[in-house]
Image: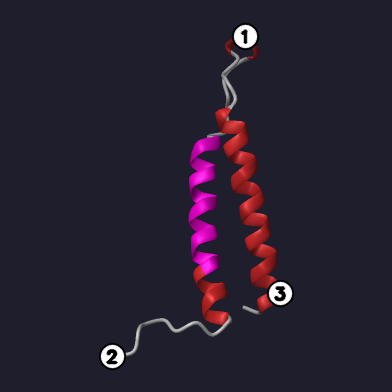
Amino acid sequence: MSLTVTLVLLAAAVALSVFAGWRGARPSQPHLGIRMVPWRFIMILAAAVVVVLVVHLAALLGMPQRPPV
């Protein structure tokens, strides 16, 4: 994956994580019905994708994967 694609996906995953965190933190409104979207779970999945993409970005930028022995 190229650097541009990685940065675009990283920005999208961060935005999704922030949005899902905001939606998941809102108080429930039972008079409007139940929430059908598991926002907290989506936030955790998006945050995991962010971690993977940050590691991939570091590898693309040439950071060593292991300390020298």
The CA span between labels 1 and 3 is 45 Å
Residue 34 highlighted magenta (yes or no): no
Quadrant position of the N terminus in the picture = bottom right
Residue type (three-letter) at the residue carrying disc 2: Val
Provide the residue span drawn in magenta: 39-54
Q: Residue visible at 57% across and 81% down?
A: 60
Tell me residue 50's x, y (percent): 54, 59
Q: Which residue is mark 3?
A: 4
Q: Locate residue 2, reporting x and y percent.
A: 66, 79
Q: Dot 2 surroundings within 10 Å: few (below 14), some, or many (20 or more)?
A: few
Q: Residue furthest bottom?
A: 69
Name the residue type under label 3: Thr
* Residue designated by label 2: 69
Q: Number of marks in the image?
A: 3
Q: Amino acid at mark 1?
A: His
Q: Nearer the viewer, mark 2 or mark 1?
A: 2
Residue 58 percent across, percent down from the top left: 53, 75
- Mark 2 or mark 3, whichever is nearer to me: 2
Label 1 sits on a secondary structure element that is: helix
**Residue 42, magenta (yes or no):** yes
Q: CA distance from mark 2 to mark 3?
A: 32 Å
Q: Which residue is mark 1?
A: 31
Res. 37 image quadrant: top right
Of the numbered discs 2 and 1, the one sitting upstream in the chain is 1
With respect to residue 43, does 24 lie above or below?
above
Label 1 or label 3, whichever comes before in sequence order: 3
> For the residue carrying disc 3, how many other residues have a C-alpha within 10 Å: few (<14), some (14-19), or many (20+)?
few
Q: Is residue 55 above or below residue 24?
A: below
56 above or below 37?
below
